[in-house]
Amino acid sequence: MRDTSNPKPTTLGEEGGHDGVPEFGDPASVHLIVGTSRARIVLSGEIDADIGPELGEATAEAEATGLPVEIDAHHITFMDSSGVAFLARLGSRMPHKVRILRAPPTVKFLLEVTRIGELLEIVDEDEGLD
């Protein structure tokens, strides 16, 4: 799961719909990329209870780095309550404020109505990973 060889954000490339953009119904994926100053968890597809173990593993590995954590949410096509719970746990456990990058409108809405967004820093731009 951990990719430390290339600390740049991943590209989904051939996956999903047109031009690599996931479409509703695409399988979920969770990847951890560790940079020099931050750890990034890249989520794509449907974030639901089916990927709970992968989310737990990524969280444990990100915590073990001791670095601030950010979530690249740009390619999330669906998120249920288990995805929201994952973000709430992450936001409340990490010593640094967790950043959510490029969240789609539906994810932003969920974070707003559940007030989980108050635990997180929601950022519309991606500065890249160093």
Image (tube, grey):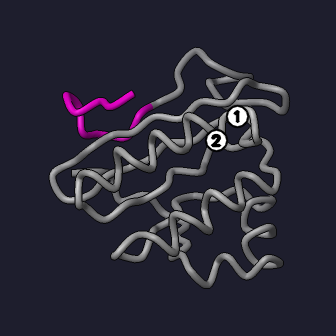
Looking at the rendered structure, the secondary structure element under dot 2 is strand
Percent position of residue 96, x then y: 35, 75
Give 36 or 91, whichever is nearer the viewer.
Answer: 91
Give 64 or 37, whichever is nearer the viewer.
Answer: 64
Q: Residue at x 80, y 44 (%)?
A: 78
Task: Characterize the local packing of mark 2: few (<14), some (14-19) or many (20 or more) Cα atoms within 10 angstroms.
Answer: many
Question: What count of labels does the image hold?
Answer: 2
Contact check, label 1 and label 2, Cβ < 8 Å? yes
Q: Which residues are magenta?
A: 1-10
Type of the residue with mark 1: Gly
Provide the residue designation for mark 2.
75
Q: Quadrant of residue 98?
A: bottom left
Looking at the rendered structure, the secondary structure element under dot 1 is strand
Task: Characterize the local packing of mark 1: few (<14), some (14-19) or many (20 or more) Cα atoms within 10 angstroms.
Answer: many
Discs 1/2, front: 1
Give 18 or 9, whichever is nearer the viewer.
Answer: 9
